[in-house]
Structures are given as structure tokens and as C-alpha cells.
């Protein structure tokens, strides 16, 4: 993108999508930021604390949203998903659809940035660990919710916690032959 009149579409309004939008707008380009959820933030808003500085993720999120609101070059479209993409005359024609079906539009952009985040692995496919069976067996985001609860003085924290790492990683029988490359540091942060 070398013409400042050009527009970038950023798909995903989590921390990476917000940061990409901010940097592109600060460089002088127009940005359309699309998020399928009704608000920006992605997983960041679900976390109890950040690592290594133990900042409140909600404060980080609020700061990013304020930066976006100050940049007139950024148009935020929440509650929207991408339903088509085609290339025509050097542009991308991207079909957007409102999650509630009422809002459909096509945007013409010069560049597309994918920042769609991730989906949690369904740990219940490993019945031997008890996720979905026992109330005290949690995935990482469920544990983050508990950390928030305990941090606000609600509920009683447990005396001990066990972490199972690599559940679902490098297991061809479950369709994941690779290492996620996230579990080790994330577990260290939670511990």
C-alpha cells in the first residue's frame, strides 16, 4: 500500500486486530475493522491478568479502544462476519454479513489483514481428564474466569491446582499433529 487513500480491511477485533488497525491508521491509511462479536476485545477481555507485568487486561483493552476511537481513519464494524472475498482489478471485494442477518454489504479494499484469533480445543474429547464431567476440571479460559472471581473476593480459591499441559497437542488421533506452542508459557503465567 503506497497510496494514502488506500484502505485496509482488518478481520478480527481482538488485541492483534486492534493493534494492526491502530498502526495502519497511524501510517495514514483508512481501515475497516470487522469483528463478529458485538464488542472489540476478543480473548483479552476474558483474561484475569497479563504476563509478565500483571496488568489488568481490561485496562489494556480499554486503552486500545480509546486509541481506535481517536483515529478517524478507522471504521469499526462489530457484529459482522466475512462471507465472500474476490479479487478484481487489484482490489479485494469483501462481502460482509451482519450476525443478526439484517446488515449485508460489500467493501472494496486494497489489503486484507487476518487477525481472527483462535478457537479453544474441546478438552472433553479426552474423557480421562474429566473436563465436562467434573466441575473442578477447567480449561484455561474457564480457569481465567475463576481467577477473576477469586480476585474479586467471590468464592474460595482451592488449596492446590494441577495443570495438564499439551492436552490435544501432538495427537494425530484427535486431529492435532502439531504443538500449539502456547501451552507452556500460558501455564507458567497461570501458575
Image (cartoon, rainbow, N blue to C red):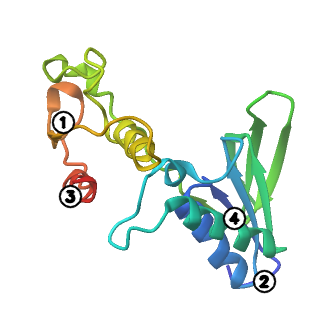
In primary-sequence order, the first of circles 2 and 4 is: 2
Do the residues bearing badges 1 and 2 touch, measured as CB atoms within 8 Å? no
Q: Which residue is mark 2?
A: 4
Instruction: State the CA–CA distance, disc 1 to disc 2.
Output: 46 Å
Residue 65 badge: 4
Circle 4: element type: helix
Q: Which residue is mark 1?
A: 167
Residue 17 badge: none
Instruction: State the CA–CA distance, disc 3 to disc 1.
Output: 15 Å
Do the residues bearing badges 4 and 1 touch, measured as CB atoms within 8 Å? no
Frontmost of labels 3 and 1 is 3
Disc 1 crowd rating (10 Å Cα; few below 14, some 14-19, many 20+) is some
Residue at 44% x, 45% y is 153
Do the residues bearing badges 2 and 4 touch, measured as CB atoms within 8 Å? no
Instruction: State the CA–CA distance, disc 4 to disc 3.
Output: 28 Å
Do the residues bearing badges 4 and 3 touch, measured as CB atoms within 8 Å? no
Residue at 76% x, 36% y is 97
Q: Quadrant of the C terminus?
A: bottom left
Q: Which residue is mark 3?
A: 188
Disc 2 crowd rating (10 Å Cα; few below 14, some 14-19, many 20+) is few
Residue at 80% x, 57% y is 108
Amino acid at each position: 500500500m503506497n497510496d494514502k487513500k488506500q484502505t485496509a480491511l482488518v478481520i478480527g477485533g481482538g488485541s492483534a486486530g486492534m493493534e494492526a488497525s491502530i498502526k495502519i491508521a497511524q501510517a495514514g491509511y483508512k481501515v475497516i475493522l470487522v469483528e463478529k462479536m458485538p464488542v472489540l476485545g476478543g480473548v483479552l477481555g476474558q483474561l484475569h491478568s497479563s504476563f509478565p507485568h500483571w496488568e489488568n487486561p481490561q485496562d489494556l483493552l480499554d486503552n486500545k479502544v480509546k486509541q481506535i476511537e481517536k483515529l478517524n481513519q478507522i471504521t469499526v464494524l462489530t457484529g459482522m462476519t466475512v462471507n465472500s472475498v474476490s479479487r478484481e482489478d487489484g482490489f479485494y471485494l469483501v462481502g460482509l454479513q451482519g450476525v443478526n442477518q439484517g446488515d449485508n454489504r460489500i467493501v472494496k479494499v486494497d489489503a486484507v489483514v487476518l487477525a481472527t484469533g483462535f478457537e479453544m480445543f474441546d478438552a472433553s474429547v479426552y474423557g480421562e481428564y474429566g473436563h465436562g464431567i467434573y466441575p473442578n476440571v477447567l480449561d484455561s479460559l474457564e480457569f481465567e474466569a475463576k481467577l477473576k472471581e477469586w480476585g474479586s473476593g467471590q468464592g474460595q480459591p482451592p488449596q492446590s491446582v494441577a495443570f495438564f499441559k499439551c492436552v490435544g497437542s501432538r495427537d494425530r488421533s484427535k486431529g492435532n499433529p502439531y504443538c500449539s506452542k502456547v501451552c507452556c508459557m500460558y501455564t507458567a503465567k497461570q501458575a
